[in-house]
Amino acid sequence: MKIHPLLKEARLFFKRDGFFVIYILRYIDNYLLSFIVYILRGGKNMENRLIPFSPPDMSDEEINEVIDTLKSGWITTGPKVKEFERNIAEYCHTSKAVCLNSATACMEMTLRLLGIGPGDEVITSAYTYTASCSVICHVGATPVLVDVKKDTYEMDYEQLSKKITSRTKVIIPVDLAGIMCDYDAIYQIVEDKKALFTPNNEMQEAFNRIIVMADSAHAFGASWHGKKCGEVADFTSFSFHAVKNLTTAEGGAVVWKDIPGFNNEWIYKQYQLLSLHGQTKDALNKTKLGSWEYDIVSPAYKCNMTDIMGGIGLAQLRRYPKLLARRKEIIQMYDKGLSGLNVKLLDHYGEDHQSSGHLYFVRINGITLEQRNEIIEKMAERGIACNVHYKPLPMLTAYKNLGFDIKDYPNAYGQFVNEITLPLHTKLSDEDIQYIISSLKDALSCY
């Protein structure tokens, strides 16, 4: 059981601490608990809030959609998922969308659609979550990691260009925190290296160049040069995990730009086959009169989205403009409150781009990793849950075992060592934001 920071202090005053802590945690609300510790402290520092990092924002709309789904008797992939897919495609200005059970599944199925496998190389950033790279391993291709440019979270595009070979088939840019990458630079590199590209199948021949598959898990709703995230890269995958701006509890979606010579309905059908055992009919189509017959055309995976998830997504998407607007307000409050401090912040909003406002990164200049961790602990003592995004892939056991060494990625390590992610979600009040800002200032005053 996770113990509130206030309890860590309160338990010092009681010998029967185990029973007392459990009793207090279950039966005393936060304000009364704060008052108890206030008395124990001799009347000092009474305010202490409980601010989680990223809870889901659920309303009666989502609850009613789930109830409607359960009452309908159709709880697996069905009409709500299909409607959600149509709405996502419309939102992203694409012809089609496919909803699966995670962004990871969306990226892996896209690599399989493209015929990526052993002998191929796929390039992604060293500064990302494992899903951006693990999908490369899943299909048997070779992952190639690129360091970030110094003092940024984007790949160093000069290094990216140098790492392209005749085996390179796909580049996976990562739109961290909700801010889209420099796709002009990426596509210019792809064009410059076009002569090296060696297609292995008809779809790769249709591109006749390296394919850009965006990991936009954070960036649903972002825009870049007036285009929505989803209509810039060749393929774009979104995450609807519980901590994301728009959630279906678990889930994800993939959209794509039109591919010359390939019908979008055919592409959609390939995703259905890849995500449902290679079965030629999903459960919804099999319910039609006399339509039980089906075939299995490949021993494929299973990673479909359910109508329960789709129903939540429909409600979230209806509310999404207001949710994005609130995130922008919070980011602007943070930006104003932290201005003048010895910190480096992201540029979420500008003339040429709009962030989805998913994460709020703070880099604290001149501190060590140990000091960064101490600051996170100090925030926790105030009841504020912070996080770190991310530990670079070469620091993780799985990627060390693949031969990657963090010494080869100094800029990624430099971004990680002093980064703190503050809470950013639509359940935060203005008072919460001011409390977080004040608490961070107090924590930083020691360094």
Image (cartoon, rainbow, N blue to C red):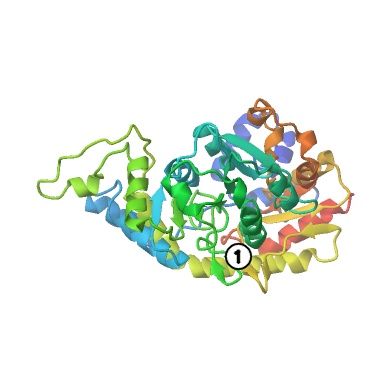
Residue 4 percent location from the top left of the image: 65, 42
- Residue at image coords 41%, 62%: 89
Residue farthest along the top direction in this orientation: 401
Check the image and report above or below for 302 versus 339: above
Relative side of 336 to 184, left or right: right
Which of 128 and 124 lies nearest the eye of the viewer? 124
Residue 347 percent location from the top left of the image: 72, 64
SS of the residue under disc 1: helix
Relative side of 156 to 318, left or right: right
Identify the residue position indicated by label 1 in the image.
Answer: 327
Check the image and report above or below for 314 versus 291: below
- Amino acid type indicated by mark 1: Arg
Please rate how many residues cluster around mark 1, counting C-alpha atoms within 10 Å: few if below 14, some from 14 to 19, many from 20: many
- Residue at image coords 32%, 56%: 265
Residue farthest along the front direction in this orientation: 195
Relative side of 284 to 133, left or right: left
Q: How many marks?
A: 1
Q: Is residue 251 visible?
A: no
